[in-house]
Image: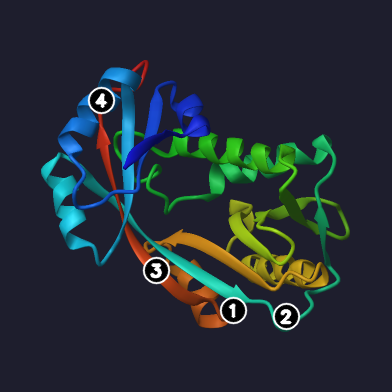
Amino acid sequence: MGVELIDIDSQVLGRNVLAITDLHEEADLAALEDRYVAESDPFYVYCKVPIEECADIHRLEQQGFELAECQLKCSLALRRRFPDVSPAYTFELVTEEDDLPAILDIARETFTHDRWSCDPAIGPEFAGLRYRQYVLRSFQAEDEAVYRLCSAETGETLAFKTHRYLGEAEVLFLLGGVDPRYKGLGLGVANEYCELNALIDREVKRGYTHFPTGNYPVINLELGQLGFRLMQAYAVLRKIYGALPGR
């Protein structure tokens, strides 16, 4: 068992964010907490635990951790192409920094179901800044990619997707969102179809994703329509230390 500093989250909040890793029954949580508080002075510490590991969940609760969200891990075998979307849209790899601002604006505003947005100790403003930074990382990282769904007529960015390549034949789906002004028009489905077809064209065979159980539209889309299969459910518990700068 140990702790990992989460760089982007720490930068966004201005205080350290840590993740507890490899939790096991024999671990002395109190001793671990004393050590990481002394060494890292964190604001936010979290641990993701398989939902069936009730004893570990209860041990974290006894140490003052609280439920932040539940997550589902799912996978999709990419065996067949999905329907082509309307020619009114284009889907393209983002390679120019000039295309990033519109995507970053969507990332800042579109997410509402995540554990930061719903946490009264953090809130949607910091959550939006966090997602912007993760999109920037995907643009800069050699093993990640940013795509955008655009209006073929105007070139306006309507939605985006990011993913990380796990070798030649697998990917981890990261973020995806639709401009809030255009939600409810079916662009989320078009965005998914385009990304999946782009990966199939690259001969990717399987993808993995994680999403919160409170995001019902995504659950219905990915499990009910796209054919994702549930692999694991997790409880994510967090503990807050003090307050954020300026609060």
Return the disc, 1 or 2, that comes first in the chain's sequence: 2
Query: Residue 149 location, x and y as percent?
Result: 76, 58
Q: Residue at x 70, y 73 (%)?
A: 205
CB atoms of marks 1 and 2 within 8 Å: yes
- Marks 3 and 2, how far apart in space? 25 Å
Check disc 2 and give the amino acid type: Phe
Measured from the top left, where is residue 117 in percent x and y? 40, 43
- Are the residues at dot 4 and dot 2 in contact (C-beta closer than 8 Å)? no
To which residue does mark 2 refer?
Answer: 82
Q: CA distance from mark 1 to mark 2?
A: 9 Å
Q: Gap in Å between the C-alphas at discs 4 and 3?
A: 30 Å
x and y percentages locating residue 109 in the rendered image: 55, 44
- Please give the residue where the numbered disc 1 appears in the rendered image: 226
The residue tagged 4 is 35
The residue labelled by disc 3 is 232
Return the disc, 1 or 4, that comes first in the chain's sequence.
4
Q: Is residue 20 left or right of residue 135?
A: left
Q: Work out how far the residue at label 1 is from the one at label 3, CA to CA, in angstroms.
A: 18 Å
Closer mark to the observer between disc 4 and disc 3: 4
**In this picture, is 24 found above or below 193?**
above
First in residue order: circle 4 vs circle 2: 4
Judge depth for marks 1 and 3 and give the one in front: 3
Residue 57 vs residue 100, the one in the foreground: 57
Which amino acid does the dot numbered 4 rest on? Answer: Arg
Please, what is the three-letter code of the amino acid marked with disc 1? Leu
Image vertical order of residue 222 relative to residue 180, above or below: below
Q: Position of residue 235 (x, y in %)?
A: 30, 57
Disc 3 residue crowd, few under 14, some 14–19, many 20+, Cα 10 Å = some
